[in-house]
Image (tube, rainbow, N blue to C red):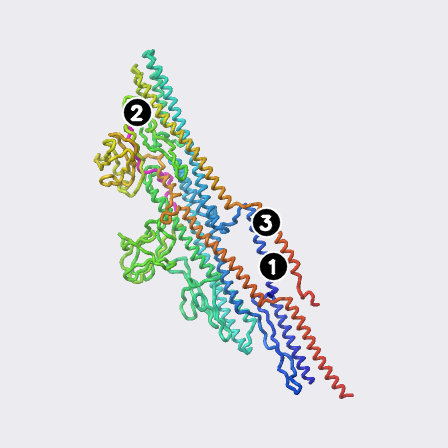
Amino acid sequence: MRISTIQLFQQRIDALQAQQQQLSRTEMQLATGKRLVTPADDPAASLRNLQLEDRRTMNVQFMENLDRAQGRLELEEGALASGVDLLQRVRELAVGALNGTNSAGDLQSIGAEVRSLLDGLVGIANTRNANGEYLFGGYQAASVPFADNGSGNVSYSGDRGNLHLQVSPTRQLAVADNGADTFMVVPASSGGTVSVFDVVNDFATALASGSPQSATLTDLDTAMDVLLGVRADVGSRLRAVDEQRNVNDSFNLVIEREQSDIMDLDYAEAISRFNRELLAFQASEQVIAKVQGLSLFNYLN
Amino acid sequence: MGSGLLDIGSSALLSSQRALDIISHNVANVNTPGYSRQRVELTARLPQVSSSGFIGTGVDVTAITRAYDQFVTSELRTSTSGFRESSTLASLAGGLDNLLADQNSGLSPMLGSFFDSIQGAANDPTSVAARQALLGEAGSLATRFQGLADWMESTRRGLTTRLDARVQEVNHIASSIASINQQIIEAQGSAGGQPPGDLLDQRDQMVLELSGLVSITTTTQEDGALNVFIGSGQSLVLGVQHSTLGIAERSNDPGQFDIMIGAPGSPAVAVTGLINGGEIGGILRYRDQVLVPAMNDLGRLAIELGTFMNGQHRAGVSLDGLPGGDLFSVASPQVAADVTNGGSIAVSFGDVSQLTADDYRLTYNGSNWTLSNANSGQAVPMSGSGSTADPFIANGIRIAVGSGAVAGDGYSIRPVRDGARSFSVLTGNPRDLALASPVAASAAIANTGTGQVTPGTVTDINNAAFQSPPGQLSPPVRVRFTSPTSYEIINQSTSAVIDTGVYDPATGADVFPTANNGTDYGYQVRITGNPAAGDEFNVAYNSGGVADNRNALLLAGMQSQKLMNGGSASFNDGYGLLVADVGAEARQAQIGSDVQAAVLKQSEAERASASGVNLDEEAADLLRYQQAYQAAAQIIAVSDTIFQTLIGAFRS
């Protein structure tokens, strides 16, 4: 094939430019640590990365939700533990009051202590969190859920809603137990349903009148069982939080590994490629420098 | 005898000189773009007849030809058009893909953080700060939608400017070709039909430049003039006449420009769809097949996201117990009526999950309305009669036809074009975010059974129970068990029994619609467990339910719900599909551009091989003709010597 002079020059420039483009691309890859310099380099891979990134940030949010769930559940667990402790103390007093050796005055003073414990119990049932929400108010977290009418009758004005948080794409976890389920539904030994407060208040009233009933012990045990039941439930949900965290963690690992496979640069390969390209580029430059001077006109003298 | 020697010598001297001239011309034009090397064609003169045979009389220069290959030249034009089209498309589409698929500039991360912020608010429904963060993220999402739409719109405007500049270049080249045609006709006439090589080279170079702008075809006239055609055979240059290209905005699609061609003395006609190749072809392909569909797709996403979020938000109640309003503003379909229309239409959205990114034409032939795809022209089936009560429904849009329509009425409908640009946040007060559900069902505390009730889910917020008046439940309802297996539903306000139902503790019961008379209040509650006779479950408006995040969870859940493309794609999937489409176009264009670049390189090499100047070759020719010249001069010297010898013989 006949070669024209301009073509010869053009070919050399083209070859140099192609090599320079390769070099600058490899340089960019090395500088960013990413295989793809722009999304258009591999649209399919960058789309996949976009989707994975979406899943990853979603997962990050679920981890945050789990932290919040844990905080809320631990606070509730603490309140329930205090409630159980308090009932335990009332039970001790009941055992003491029922041993038949107490004078009327003794019973009066035990009654006074039980009454103040009842106030404590209402206080626990009206626990608020850092946001000022009443833990046991159901959805009605802005208003005081439990109120004493002055004579020891405690009523509940909250509802039976329980806040749930989303902890995985498909799982919602209850992070609250409303006051009705926690404090208001104790099956009474005499039949029917009473509240935890009723049990304590009835005991205090009986002490005031000097005639404590042995049924009080049974009712106190049942009340404690209700609270312990809720507490056990909270405990199992706290374990669920941990489990879900592990699940989300391993899901995250899977995503990050795939993202790395798609996007990250193989440094060893890139560096050896860079050296190869640099060598070829230098060789081309030297060849051009040598060939450039050749022309028959040099000899026409 | 002696004069023969002198004639032959001078003819040789002259032709060598011509050849040396041409060689110098070649060397001088070694770097001239489009130059074809020239050659002298030498022919031996007719010999004289003598008794001893034919005696030669020297040499003549019969022609000066250029090294030119018609096939290679036209290949070069075709590959130049192809390369410029695909490289223009590749660089434009690559730019759009880089914007849309980028982790920072794209929509995807904003969509993610918006939904994250809903979950943040759901974690703390009473927290005004968390609600404020949600509004902030909603604002960022809206800004990103608008930003992308603005970028695309300003790109489209920029393309119009670029098209205009290229069209003017085409006009300039066309007029130059027409005037060089004139010169070639004259030169060829005066040279007795000999082709004027340098003029032809110049014209070929102009035509090549033109090929870089738009695909062309050519024919050569007998007199040497070249005719140039574009599109499907519209003449750009005819002999010494040329047409003029221009751009014009479509009357029914603002911002969209057509390419017009006007032959001398006739009105301009649009040739946009007929033009291809070259930079202009690349720009048009990018604009009409990548950019505008992407604008529509983004608009569609904004409209679907806005509509679904609004729908769910309306089904909630605010921190102050008020019904939720619209969270985002959603654009209306863009409709452009033809100027000659007699009637009018009203277009609105129906089931937005059915929306497509297409634009449509609605036409009336005097008896029937026809909807067609604006790009492909394919008919789109519509249901309905077109009346306000029973509008035409097709692909998520509803069209109600007004009175006065006459045959020939036409409308351009672009349902989703404005979607992204008009997407903005309507709710400004964080307390107005409706994160709670309006229904709160609860078991009465005095119940003795173990029956439980779900808090309730809204199935239709537009039900009269919620809407007359809004902000309360009309009526509040009580479900009372008359036995462990039967219940009655009671209007709490009037104590009237609405309906009764049978209960199976093994399966539980969805209370609504009620079992016998099908009463439906737009919500559902489910009772499970073992209620005892006399147990009651109350359903009331959820006022004061500040720690309720049920609606927030439903809003957040829309992130992974498949609400787009008729229920097959989530919002992020929908955006991903847009990015994938643009990415595939960019990738394809890049591959096409690489292929075309190789083809172009090959054509250029072939042309350079056939027509280019090689300096070494010219140097060798220079030597050759220099020697021939020296030899010819020697012939003249010898003829002189012979003459002198003859004179000398007479003298002595």
Q: Which residues are magenta?
A: B424-445
Distance of label 3 from label 2 (alpha carbons): 79 Å
Does the image show residue B129? no
Which residue position holds label 3?
A274
Residue B379 found in image quarter: bottom left
Residue A13 found in image quarter: bottom right
* Chain of the residue under label 3: A
**Which amino acid type is shown beneath numbered disc 1?**
Arg
Q: Residues within 10 Å of mark 2 (few under 14, many from 20)?
A: some
Residue B443 part of the magenta segment: yes
- Above-or-below relation of B79 to B466: below
- Seen from the viewer's position, the closer of residues B441 and B138 is B441
Q: Looking at the rendering, in which quadrant would you find the N terminus of chain B?
A: bottom right
Q: Are marks 1 and 2 in contact (CB under 8 Å)?
A: no
- Seen from the viewer's position, the closer of residues A276 and B159 is A276
Distance of label 1 from label 3 (alpha carbons): 21 Å
Q: Looking at the rendering, in which quadrant would you find the C terminus of chain B?
A: bottom right
**Which amino acid type is shown beneath numbered disc 3?**
Phe
Q: Residue at x 58, y 51 (%)?
A: A23
Q: Residue furthest right?
A: B652
**Which amino acid type is shown beneath numbered disc 2?**
Pro
Residue A227 part of the magenta segment: no
| Position of residue A160 measured from the top left corner of the image (x, y, whole percent) | 32, 32
